[in-house]
Amino acid sequence: MLKKISSRLYKSEPMQRCKLEECRAACCLYGVWIDRAEAQEILNNAGLIQPHLPAENQNPDGWFDDRQEADDHSLCGQVVHSSVLEDANHYGGTACVFLRPDFKCALQVAGEACGFDPWRFKPFYCIVHPLDLDNHGQITLDETDLLLNEPASCLRTAHAPIPLAETFEPELRYLLGDNAYKQLRSSAGGSLTAAAPEEETKE
């Protein structure tokens, strides 16, 4: 599994995560690409998700738009896109259909409410963000300056370098599994602490 990690994530850099009460899920501005299998899973569990959305967004027929494209890194090789709605209260004036008025993701809230893993219904590209996949399918991170200068970024400047493997522990532990993550942290440096996905730090 460690072959899926780019060399960038073994470094330490002066950046830290944003906080939901400050960023108000700005990263949900443009919605997300979702593997067809993930989209179908969301639709199959619509009854569990609908109660956590505003009434006007509860119709599953409006959860995905007409966009689709090939994606070599997705499970089915093809992705569809979540609907993007006008939202004057959100950063940039638009938001993913699954974003709630309290700036929490309905998919994540539904997972927690059902006693599942919080990311049970979350699309892969939501879970991995602000990490991304490079051309080789390895998990990586875009250039620091671009991320820290973007108001909608999920990252903020830190006073001192922090191992990226520590900063992104919830995502990497979830995607790699505990054993592979421990190997990564051992190679990347930094103290190893247990962590779980947190609603207030990721949407």
Image (cartoon, rainbow, N blue to C red):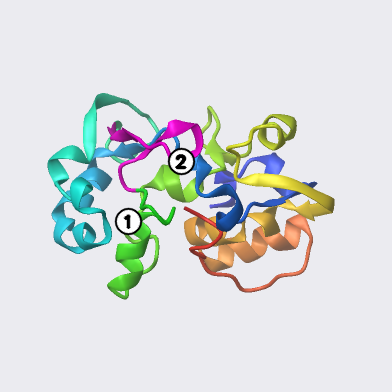
Q: Which of these two is toward me, 140 or 162?
A: 162
Q: Position of residue 81 (x, y in %)?
A: 30, 33
Q: Position of residue 135 (x, y in %)?
A: 53, 27
Q: Indicate which disc, 2 or 1, sits on the residue closer to the N terminus.
A: 2
Q: In the picture, residue 84 is in which quadrant?
A: top left
Dot 1 falls on a residue whose secondary structure is helix
- Is 157 magenta? The answer is no
Residue at 64%, 32% (x, y): give it: 150
Residue at 38%, 68% (x, y): give it: 117
User: Is residue 110 placed above or below 158 in the rendered structure?
Assistant: below
Q: Which of these two is toward me, 12 or 189?
A: 12
Report the residue that reaches farthest toward the right.
160
Residue of label 2: 90
Q: Which of these two is toward me, 49 or 169?
A: 49
Would residue 66 be seen by someone viewing this image from the given angle? yes
Q: Nearer the viewer, mark 2 or mark 1?
A: 2
Residue of label 1: 107
- Residue type at mark 1? Leu
Q: Position of residue 82 (x, y in %)?
A: 30, 37
Spatial CA span between label 2 and label 1: 18 Å
Q: Which of these two is toward me, 55 or 13?
A: 55
Residue extent of the magenta highlight:
80-98
- Is 83 magenta? The answer is yes
- Left or right: where does residue 199 sit relative to residue 42? right
- Left or right: where does residue 23 sit relative to residue 52? right
Residue at 22%, 41% (x, y): give it: 63
Dot 2 falls on a residue whose secondary structure is loop
Within 10 Å of the Cα at label 2, are there few (<14), some (14-19), or many (20+) other Cα atoms? some
Q: In the picture, residue 52 is in which quadrant?
A: bottom left
- Residue type at mark 2? His
